[in-house]
Amino acid sequence: MPLPQAFLDRMQTMLGEEYPQFVAAYQQPHFRGVRLNPLKCDRETLETAIGPLQPSPFSPLCFYTETEKVGSLPLHHAGAFYSQEPSASSAVTVLAPHPGEKVLDLCAAPGGKSTQIAACLMGQGLLWSNEIVKNRAQILLSNMERMGVKNAVVSSCHPETLCSRLAGFFDKVLVDAPCSGEGMFRRDQQAVEEWSPEHVKACADRQLAILHSAKQAVKEGGVLVYSTCTFSPEENEGVIRRFLEEEPGFVLESPNVSFGRKAEAMDAVRIYPMDGGEGHFAARLRRVSENPHSPSTLKLPAEKGENFKLARELLQKIFRTPPQNSLMQAGSRVYLLPEGLPELSGLGVLRAGVEVGEVKGKRMEPAHGLFMAAKPEALRFCVSFPFNGKEMAAFLRGEELGVELDAPNGSYVGVAVDGVTVGYGKYSGGRLKNHYPKGLRNKK
């Protein structure tokens, strides 16, 4: 599809003698990448399944791949990796989250950057992933579950409401803002069709408003990273300049990365197709002003009642060493909570932590996510199949499996692919009844 002439004219002005190289890139296939999920997998296991991986410069977890249609692969089902355009991982590298920190991903769907943050936190600290659009928030939730993230809250809340209520709570905040998507032109025709100079201006105004909401959530001395997947100066350097003029409590600091190139008259990073990625911009800001606010801590009632008892008994049956995190009940479901939660009410929370299971009659059936967040060695019973075996293919189609286990009838048994948990089944008489969710199954 032809690119908009106004876009090309502006890029020629911006790039000068590099412009022919930029235009030539649009005649080439777009970059494909995968990002390793160290919460569940290692590089050797991943390479065995999808072939040699070429490191990208944007994150130590991100690799180039020429493999297509990776979504049906068993290790993708298992959350061993996330399919992601390579330069999209740059923003979290600029954010540089560390284990133990509290991090907010304010515009998080579909979950690429949130699951990357979770990998950096390695189960320590707290991640809050928010998406204002409810159906996109459900996709975010599904990806967080697939990747086995335990220490996270997923919400669908307006940024202003969320950040005012959680003012001063976070060490680091990422605003990967909705944008005109110029960095997606090579792989998304709709982004080309929707582009116009007016759309660019509207995006810039919205992005500035989101930044002003986000600033409230950053504690004193904390970091705010702003990123887009567009080339537009209005949406990138322009938004940062306007924000710093209106908010003297923040300063721009070096992104401290070696990839990409310096932004226009600003210490931020730009990535073009010539730099090995489809396109990204990221700026790192530090809050130097005080933020005296802090949200109230979540207060949980005592674990009284049959549902809590059923949940604890279920955890005892499934795990060698049952997790001792606090439990919270919501309707007929019970959740295993991460530590250090603020008050959750009124913030559109879809899930906090990991769902243990749902009460059905006088029993509790375990949730798929409980197994996805568990390593095989943590489970009392687990079977592992090779990625290219007929058993794994059958399991991902939802079929019952024949297995011989030294386990009591009625036991819940984890199922793994090459040692990475992908789901579970219920064992009885040499058969494993399949509990892989119907909406996730391969069709053939």
Image (cartoon, helix red, strand yellow):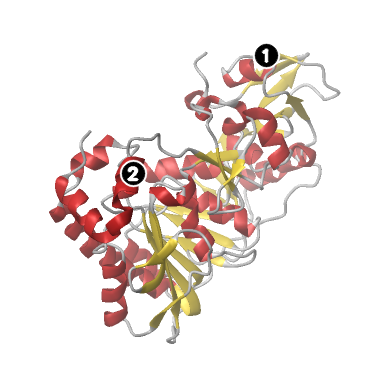
Viewer-nearest of labels 1 and 2?
Answer: 2
On the image, the x and y values in percent for residue 425 come to 67, 25
Residue furthest to the front: 17
- Above or below residue 247? Residue 181 is above
Task: Pick whichever, 74 or 227, lies toward us.
Answer: 227
Residue in view at x 73 percent, y 30 percent: 418
Q: In this view, does 43 lie to the left or right of 63?
A: right
Point out which mark residue 184 bears. 2
On the image, the x and y values in percent for residue 279 come to 38, 51
Residue in view at x 86 percent, y 23 percent: 406
- Above or below residue 328? Residue 359 is above
Q: Is residue 159 left or right of residue 399?
A: left
Q: Is mark 1 on a helix, strand or loop?
A: helix
On the image, the x and y values in percent for residue 204 come to 23, 62
Point out which mark residue 22 bears. none
User: Within 10 angstroms of label 1, few (less than 14), some, or many (20 or more) residues?
Assistant: few
Task: Pick whichever, 212 or 366, lies toward us.
Answer: 212
- Above or below residue 131? Residue 415 is above
Instruction: Give the Cα distance between marks 1 and 2.
Output: 37 Å
On the image, the x and y values in percent for residue 232 come to 26, 58
Question: Can residue 295 be seen?
Answer: no
Residue furthest to the right: 406
Q: What amino acid type should be assigned to the residue bearing mark 1?
A: Lys
Task: Pick whichever, 298 or 234, lies toward us.
Answer: 234
Q: Do the residues labelled 1 and 2 touch (CB within 8 Å)?
A: no
Q: What amino acid type should be assigned to the residue bearing mark 2?
A: Met
Q: In this view, does 213 lie to the left or right of 219?
A: left
Question: Can residue 176 be seen?
Answer: yes
Point out which mark residue 390 bears. 1
Q: Is mark 2 on a helix, strand or loop?
A: helix
